[in-house]
Amino acid sequence: MALNNGLKINAILLAVVLAMANVAGAVEPPLLGDVPDGSRATPLHLIPMLAEPLPGKEPDQIYPKNDPALPFSTKATCGACHSYDIVTTGWHFNAVDSNVPAGRIGQPWIFADPLTATVIPLSYRDWPGTFRPQQIGLTPMGFLGHFGRQMPGGGIGEMLDKTDNPDEVLRVGITGQLEIDCLACHNTSPGQNMGSAAGYAIQVIKGNYRWAATASSEIAYVSGTTKNLPESYDFREPFVSSDSKAKPPIVEYDKSAFGHNDWVQFDISVHMLKQRCYFCHSNVDIHDGRTEKWSADEDIHLYAGLTCVDCHRNGFKHNITRGYPGESKDSNNVLAAHSSCEGCHLNNKDSNTPAAGRFAAPVPAHPGIPPIHFEKLSCTACHSGPWPKAELVRTKTAQAHALGIAGASKETDVLPHLVYPVFAKAQDGKIAPHKLFWPAYWATMDGNNITPLNIDAVKAAAGKVITKAAYSKTGDWPNLKEEDIANVLSAMASDVEAGAKPVYIAAGKLYSLDEAGKLISVEDKIAAPYMWPIAHDVRPAAQSLGVRSCGDCHSTNSPFFFGLVPVDSPLKQVTAAGVEMVKFQDLPRFYTKAFAWSFIFRPWLKVITLACCAVIAGVLLLYALKALYFVAKIFVGRES
C-alpha cells in the first residue's frame, strides 16, 4: 500500500512538473525589437504599416492605393517587432495600475472650469491631495477629452470601454481606443505633428482616437471628426448619408513615403529629442503680463549638451527614471539610484566603484558650507528654479494650460494660477522648491470626509446663481461674492445625501452654511494648497543660493524664509496678506527670525573675536616673555 501511495505521489509530481514545463513553453519568446544586440547605431525602421485588425484576424497592410485609406495602428505596426503589452507597463502609461508605487508627488492633471469657479487636482496615482477623475464624474472618455491632448496614449486611453455609461461604450466602436503613440517620443522627423490644427492633440480633442497617431506622423493628414457620427458607422467602410452634416475622419497619405513593397521608413531613435519631451513638459513664466520664452534661460544641463533622456533613462519596459532622491525604493530601474543630482555629482559611499562625474558632471566641494545644510536642504533648493524674490513667479505649464496646441488660450490670467518657487518641506523631510496652486471646488462633507461633487451637478446649480456678468473673458476666476457662494450651496442642499452637507473649498478655507442658512468659513487643512517639488530649470553653480554670502537666505527679509505665498481666490473681496514660507517649512517663525538677526551682528562678532584673540595672544606673549625672563635669570644665576 505504501508503495502504491508513493507511485501516486510521484505521478502527481511528474504531472505538475510537466504542466509547469508546458506553461513555461507557452510564454511567447521576445520579439525582434525587445532585446537589443548592443549596437549603438540607430536601427533602420523600414516597415509595413498595419491597420487595426478585426477581432481574431491578422492586421492588414496599408497600401497607398487603398480607398478608403485606413489609419495605421501603432499596436499592430510597432507591435510586430516590439511587445506592446510590456511597453504599456511604463511610467507614462501605468497610472491606472494600482499595483504601481505612486512615487514622489508630482504635477497632477488640473481640472479648471471658470464657469463654476473650480480648480481641482486629479490623478489616477495615489498622490496626497489629489482626487480620482471619476469622483467629479469624469469617465475615461471624459478624462481624455480634457487631458488626452498631452498624453502619449495607452493607459486610460485604452480603457474607454471600462465605463458605466452605455452611450460611451457604443462610441468606442466609432472613436477607437487611444493607443500608445510611439512616434510622439521616438520620431526624430521635424514633421512630427503634435499641436497644429490637424495634429495629435486636436485629433484627441475631436474624439478621433483611432486616427491620432496617424495624424501625428509626417506622412499623413487627417481631417474630419467622429463627433455626430451615427452608432452604425464603420471606419473601414465610412459611409455617411448625403443628408448628414457629419464629416467622418479621412486619411490622406503622402504617396511618396511608400517605397519598396509599399513599406514606409520612420526616423525612429531610442535617444529622444528634447523637443518631443517639451510638448508635454514645457513651462513659461509670466513677467509683466508677458510670456515670451526668449527672456528666460534654459536648463544648464541642456546648454552643456545633455538631453532629457540622458538623466531620465529607461529600458524597453519604459520604466523611466524621474530623478528624485530615494527613487530606487519606488522603482526597479537599475539606474534610479544614479539618476538624481547626487547620482551624477557625488560619490555613493555604499558603492564599490566611484560614480561621481557621470556625463562629465563636476564634483562640488561646497567649501565653508556647514554640513547641516545637506541634511535639511535638497540640491534643488539652491540650484533650481528662478532666484527667490519678494514676489513669486506666475507660470504656465503644458499639462495645465495646453501650451503648444493650436487654439489654446494665451491669456496670462487663464486658470489655473500656478506660482513658484515655494520653498517647502518635501516628502523626504528636506526643504525643496515647489510649484503651488490653491484648489477650489464644490464638495459634500460627511463628518470629516470630503467628497467632490459631480461637475455636471455643480454646473446645474451654479448656473442658476453665477451670471454671465461674473465671467471673465480671459479665463480668470469669475467675480464671485460671498452671497453667491451661499446661494449655490443653498441650491445644492436638497441634492446631497442625508447626513452630509454641501461645502465650497477655496483660498485655504472651507465654506458652508450654518443652521440658520448663513455662510461661515473656517481654515481647514483639507483646503491647503497643492504643491509638487521641481528640479528644473537648473542654474549654474555661480548662480546658486549662498554664492554671494549667507545673507542670500539668512537675512531678516530673505524670500527663502519670509517670502509671501499669495492666496488665490475667486472671491474678489477676500484679501489675504499671503502665507510666509516658514509655514510650509515647519519652522518656528520667531527662532528663524532671531537666527537671521544674528547674521547682522556676525561681522561685529568676527571683529570682536579677532580683537579678543589679539588680546589673549598679547597676554600669552607677555607671560611667555616673563617666563623666558625668569628662565634666563635662573640660567644666569647658575653660571655666576
Image: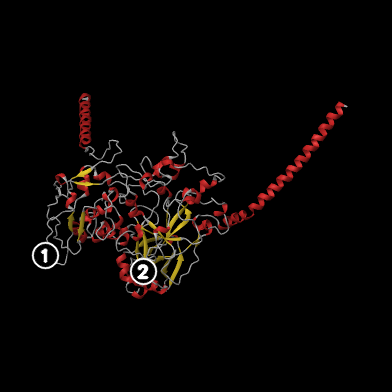
Pointer 1: residues within 10 angstroms few (<14), some, or many (20+)? few
Q: Quadrant of residue 134?
A: bottom left
> Which element is circle 2 on?
loop
Which of 283/79 is in front?
283
The residue under label 1 is 241
Q: Is residue 57 left or right of residue 560?
A: left
Query: Quadrant where the N terminus lies?
Result: top left
Are the two marked residues, 2 and 1, in contact with CB atoms closer than 8 angstroms?
A: no
Question: Which of the colour schemes (rainbow, by chain, secondary structure, one colour) is used?
Answer: secondary structure
> Which disc, if any, is residue 640?
none
User: Could you say which quadrant of the image residue 442 lies in?
Assistant: bottom left
Q: Is residue 550 above or below residue 110?
A: above
Report x, y in % for residue 526. 42, 60
Label 2 belongs to which residue?
474
Can residue 378 be seen in this snapshot? no
Residue depicted at x 35% and y 57%: 398
Q: Is residue 363 visible?
A: yes
Position in image of residue 226 (x %, y %): 19, 61
Name the amino acid, label 1. Ser
Q: Where residue 263 sits in the image (x, y, percent)?
A: 17, 46
Q: Could you tell me residue 211's position as x and y percent? A: 21, 55
Crowd tier of the residue under label 2, counting other residues whose Cα lies within 10 Å: few below 14, some 14–19, many 20 or above: some
Which image quarter holds the C terminus? Answer: top right
Picture quadrant where residue 27 is located: top left
Of 4 and 294, which appears nearest the observer? 294
Q: Residue at x 50, y 54 (%)?
A: 585
| Helix, strand or loop status at disc 1 | loop
Give the residue type at disc 2.
Answer: Thr
Q: Of all residues shown, which one is farthest toward the top? A: 3
Is residue 415 toward the left or the right of residue 260 in the image? right
Number of numbered labels in the structure image: 2
Q: Using the image, determine if residue 442 lies above or below residue 470.
A: above
